[in-house]
Image (tube, rainbow, N blue to C red):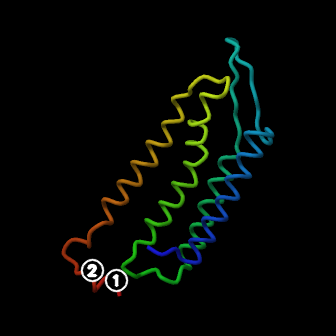
Amino acid sequence: MKLTQNLKIYIILNLVTTTLFYWLTVFNDVGVERTKNADGTETISTSMPLLWLLIFFVSFLLLYKTDNIRGTRSNLGFAYHVAATVIVLLPVIAMLILWPFTSYGFDPFLLLPIAALSVSLLIHWFFTRKDPKGIEGKKVFK
């Protein structure tokens, strides 16, 4: 499937916001509250992911709804889903690759977003790969 103009804008916008999110929260601790636990570990809490999620959601609504090839046989929603999954998983996979070279221990929690996003993408693909039951695809997609 060819990338539409709106999909390109969505990818660039969300790559920039993801980079800013990681730079602000992970590297500069903007909006991050650290709490020392009794066992010596540290708990980190932040509301920045909610802002990041809101930017993803609003950009999806605005760009997907105004995309000029909606209603065609191409599965535009799946393309946006793949783009969002790749953008979200890039930093997670980068952390998994770089983890052996850092002093931190392995955190199995990082496998949770990979599994959840992969399963959601698989479910989206499974339910959109065929024409709707009992309805001819040419009538639905003009």
Which amino acid type is marked by label 1? Phe
Residue at image position (70%, 22%) is 42
Image location (x, y in percent) of residue 84? 54, 58
- Residue 11: x %, y % from top left: 60, 64
The disc at residue 137 is 2
Q: Is residue 48 above or below residue 57?
A: above
Tag 2 secondary structure:
helix
Frontmost residue, 22 versus 56: 22
- To which residue does mark 1 refer? 141
Q: Neighbour class for label 1 at 10 Å: few (<14), some, many (≥20)?
A: few
Per the image, label 1 sits on a secondary structure element best described as loop
**Badge 2: residue crowd in 10 Å (few <14, some 14–19, many ≥20):** few
Query: Viewed as shown, does residue 60 lie left or right of 129?
Result: right
Q: Which residue lies furthest to the top in this view?
A: 39
Task: Measure the alpha-carbon separation of dots 2 and 1.
Answer: 6 Å
Residue 140 located left or right of residue 5:
left
Residue 7 coordinates in the image, percent (x, y)? 56, 71
Vertical position of residue 139 compared to residue 87: above or below: below
Residue 66 occupies quadrant:
bottom right
Q: In which quarter of the image is the N terminus?
A: bottom left
Q: Which residue is drawn at 74% across and 24% down?
A: 35
Farthest residue to the left: give it. Answer: 134
The residue that appears at 67% across and 11% down in the rendered structure is 39
Quarter of the figure with residue 127: bottom left
The answer to the question of whether label 2 and label 1 lie on touching residues, with beta carbons closer than 8 A, is: yes
Label 2 amino acid?
A: Gly
- Which residue is pictured at 60% across the width and 72% down the height? 62
